[in-house]
């Protein structure tokens, strides 16, 4: 029997990362934050002066990147990456490089390598549709744009970063637009995913929903 995968897809700042991480802890599974790979590529491109629309150069960079997850800390090419990975500039760059077909293809094998026993919980945009189409459980986790902007605001504040809710809301809407309208793996609720709308749910409730869903499938 193949290694179980729980795929949680959804728009930015929906809380899917927090939920996915908690579910992974509960089950003792590995966790892959696939958005981090696109964010790391944007970081590496800015570091190396590669234009964010140079598809061939970006795909090459994507396959060469040496990424190591050490708990909360991520290392890129032998050096730790700081909080800038979570910033809006990096997120915007990530959503630009993520629209390129060759970049997505270059990151496919890297993502599949994370599927290891006893299991994997992963979050992103196309985890259940493209990367792990045979995932054990597929969830589409979303929330209203306003609530997502408020959550992102709280998260940034806690990290000591400054932000305005109105700006965050604008960024989130722009990113939603780009992520849903692109031709390469557009963000969408695919038919075999269960919808989890967290607009009025807290993290505990969302985690419970996913764990129950997994127990029914496992
Ligand atoms: O999830 P996160 O906000 O970290 O993702 C950053 C960007 O990376 C998203 O806006 C999206 O464009 C892209 N992404 C993607 N496919 C994934 C994960 C992230 O296209 N599986």
Image: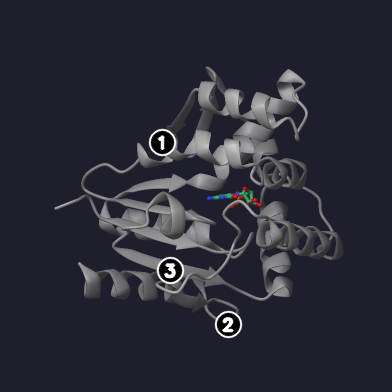
Q: In the picture provided, is 215 more to the left or to the right than 16?
A: left
Outermost residue, left side: 1
Whole-Å distance between the Cαs marked 2 and 3? Answer: 17 Å
Q: Are marks 1 and 2 in contact (CB under 8 Å)?
A: no
Task: Determine the residue positioned at 30% across, 59% down.
Answer: 26
Name the quadrant containing residue 170. Answer: bottom right
Per the rendering, the mark at residue 200 is 2
Give whichever of 205, 77 is nearer the camera. 77
Q: Are marks 3 and 1 in contact (CB under 8 Å)?
A: no
Label 3 sits on a secondary structure element that is strand
Residue placed under numbered mark 3 in the picture: 139
Q: Position of residue 157 (x, y in %)?
A: 72, 54
Give whichever of 60, 196 is nearer the camera. 60
Residue placed under numbered mark 1 in the picture: 109
Compared with residue 58, is residue 84 higher up or lower down, i.e. above or below? below
Viewport quadrant of the C terminus: bottom left
Residue 121 appears in the picture as rendered: yes
Q: Position of residue 69 (x, y in %)?
A: 45, 33
Task: Determine the residue positioned at 35% across, 36% down.
Answer: 113
């Amino acid at each position: 029997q193949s290694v179980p995968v729980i795929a949680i897809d959804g728009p930015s700042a929906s809380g899917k990362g927090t939920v996915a991480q908690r579910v992974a802890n509960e089950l003792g599974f590995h966790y892959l934050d696939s958005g981090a790979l696109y964010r790391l590529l944007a970081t590496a491109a800015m570091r190396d002066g590669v234009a964010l629309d140079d598809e061939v150069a970006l795909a090459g960079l994507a396959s060469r990147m040496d990424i190591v997850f050490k708990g909360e800390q991520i290392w890129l090419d032998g050096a730790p990456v700081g909080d800038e990975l979570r910033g809006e500039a990096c997120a915007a760059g990530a959503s630009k490089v993520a629209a390129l077909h060759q970049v997505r293809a270059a990151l496919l094998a890297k993502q599949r390598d994370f599927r290891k026993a006893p299991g994997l919980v992963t979050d992103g945009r196309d985890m259940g549709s493209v990367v792990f189409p045979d995932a054990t459980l597929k969830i589409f986790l979303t929330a209203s744009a306003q609530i997502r902007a408020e959550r992102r605001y709280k998260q940034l504040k806690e990290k000591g970063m400054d932000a305005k809710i109105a700006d965050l809301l604008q960024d989130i809407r722009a990113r939603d637009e780009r992520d849903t309208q692109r031709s390469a793996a557009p963000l969408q609720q695919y038919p075999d995913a269960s919808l989890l709308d967290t607009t009025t749910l807290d993290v505990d409730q969302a985690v419970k929903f996913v764990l129950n869903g997994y127990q029914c499938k496992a």
